Amino acid sequence: MEKVKQIPATLMDWIIKTLNSGVNPEAIVDAMIRKGYDPRLSYTTLFRIVGNKPIDTPGVQAPYEYEQPEIEKKGSILRTSDREIKVLSKVEKPFILHLDNFLSYEECDQLIEFSRSRLKPSTVIDQKTGEEKAATGRTSKGMSFYLLENEFIKNIETRISELTEFPVENGEGLQILNYGIGEEYKSHFDYFPPSKVDPEKGGQRVGTFLIYLNDVLAGGETVFPKAGVSIVPKKGSAVYFQYGNSKGEVDRMSLHSSIPVSVGEKWVATKWIRQGNIYSDKVV
């Protein structure tokens, strides 16, 4: 089906009325996409209506106290033991840090080649049961490396740890995702349902480190609809967003999606970070 490229005035009026009634903005965008509207146009239209400011949805935002992440204290030029990384942009609520030059082009290519033969259809976390399952909202292929699987993976995980100040053992194995044309990951949260958090396996997820492994010719942006933020994939760059605090609260402003790829393909690496050691620490 050909995507609709223009938003009629009647639809604009409906979007404003629906937002004012308290409907989640991500539900509005999903409805527009199902009706045949271009995904990027759908998101940018919503951002324009709310003035590129966070969208408040009455009755949905759970209490969350923002705390300054350690990575934010390091300034605009971040240094690890083997690399200098520049901060491109920052959003405070939700906390989102856009980084340039996290991986070299050679490292990106190597990650893709290491993972290509191990790709399988991606799964999602069921928000009711906490279990992994196949889902129509996530149409990518993926694989996961074991933690510290080899020296190359260890170097990347160490770099992430040095930036975020979370120990390597607080991170899940590095996951690689590949999106083809039309493939996407609809609006979702990365944290677990509170009732499904396992304190024996590191507890709740508190942050996500997302690395872009290639330049996407069109589409594939990472969108935070409640914050009015859209990030275009750039090879070697990364996005870190934190949604968990020391009180065990989670930030519903961290809702995000990967919009469909229009031209070419998209490769990303994802590191999910938990409160504690995923092997042995009991989080209390």
Image: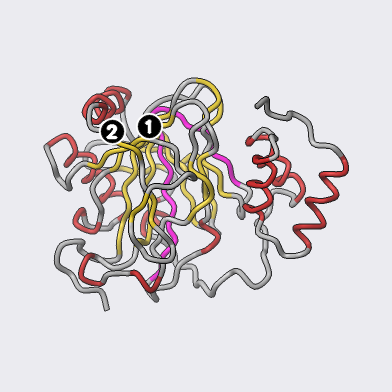
Q: Provide the residue span drawn in magenta.
A: 229-245
Q: Is residue 67 left or right of residue 49?
A: left
Three-letter amino acid code at disc 2?
Leu
Q: How is the image coloured?
A: secondary structure
Q: Quadrant of residue 177?
A: top left
Tally the marks.
2
Q: Nearer the viewer, mark 2 or mark 1?
A: 2
Three-letter amino acid code at disc 1?
Asn
Query: In the rendering, at what x and y percent does residue 127 appear?
Result: 43, 62
On screen, 269 above or below 168?
above
Identified at 85% across, 49% down, the residue is 13
On screen, 50 above or below 191?
above
Q: Quadrant of residue 59?
A: bottom right
**Badge 2: residue crowd in 10 Å (few <14, some 14–19, many ≥20):** some
Query: In the rendering, at what x and y percent does residue 256 appear?
Result: 52, 50
**Badge 1: residue crowd in 10 Å (few <14, some 14–19, many ≥20):** many
Q: Which residue is mark 1?
A: 178
Going from the N terminus, do you reach mark 2 or mark 1 first?
2
Identified at 43% across, 47% down, the residue is 135
Q: Which residue is mark 2?
A: 119
Question: Residue extending furthest bottom?
Answer: 284
Q: Is residue 50 left or right of residue 225?
A: right
Query: In the rendering, at what x and y percent does residue 125 appear?
Result: 38, 56
Q: Is residue 87 left or right of residue 45?
A: left
Q: Are marks 2 and 1 in contact (CB under 8 Å)?
A: yes
On screen, 21 above or below 184?
below
Depth check: give the residue in front, 105 or 47: 47
Depth check: give the residue in front, 120 or 209: 120
On screen, 53 above or below 86?
below
